[in-house]
Image (cartoon, rainbow, N blue to C red):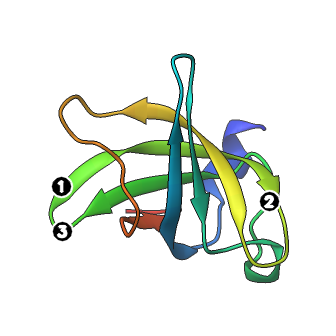
Amino acid sequence: IPVGKILDQPLIEGVVLSVKNTADFSMVALNVGSDHDVEKGMTFEIWTGGQYKGTVRVDNVTPNMCSALVTLAVDGASIAEGDNASTRL
């Protein structure tokens, strides 16, 4: 995805539905999908309260949800079900 497209992402806000951690990667499911203008390659920032937890990149999109690969995880801050997700902070 070109950098310009990342910077032009529409504001989309959602919630983490689930998290899957393996030895090689971590994935999350978000409650927003193509019906909310989510596209493959978009990035979402993840946080809860005042704590920033990381960045995810959308890998798969369905009408009402998407799955995303964790590309940045903040040390000591685990992404969890119920965390907030937004294309912009």
Pointer 2 residue = 39
Q: Residue at x 15, y 63 (%)?
A: 50
Q: Residue at x 69, y 45 (%)?
A: 4
Amino acid under disc 3: Gly
Q: Residue at x 41, y 63 (%)?
A: 81
Q: On residue 24, which mark appears?
A: none
- Label 2 Cα neighbours within 10 Å, binned few <14 / some 14-19 / many ≥20: some
Pointer 3 residue = 49
Ranked by sequence position, the earlier of labels 3 and 2 is 2
Left or right of residue 17, residue 78 in this image: left
- Comparing 38 with 22, the one in front is 22
The alpha-carbon separation of the residues under discs 3 and 2 comes to 26 Å
Pointer 1 residue = 51
Q: Which residue of the protein is positioned furthest toward the top in this rendering? A: 24
Q: Is 55 placed above or below 18 here? A: above
Residue 56, percent from left and from top = 54, 44
Amino acid under disc 2: Glu
Picture quadrant of residue 63: bottom right
Find out whether the residues at labels 1 and 3 contact each other: C-beta distance under 8 Å: yes
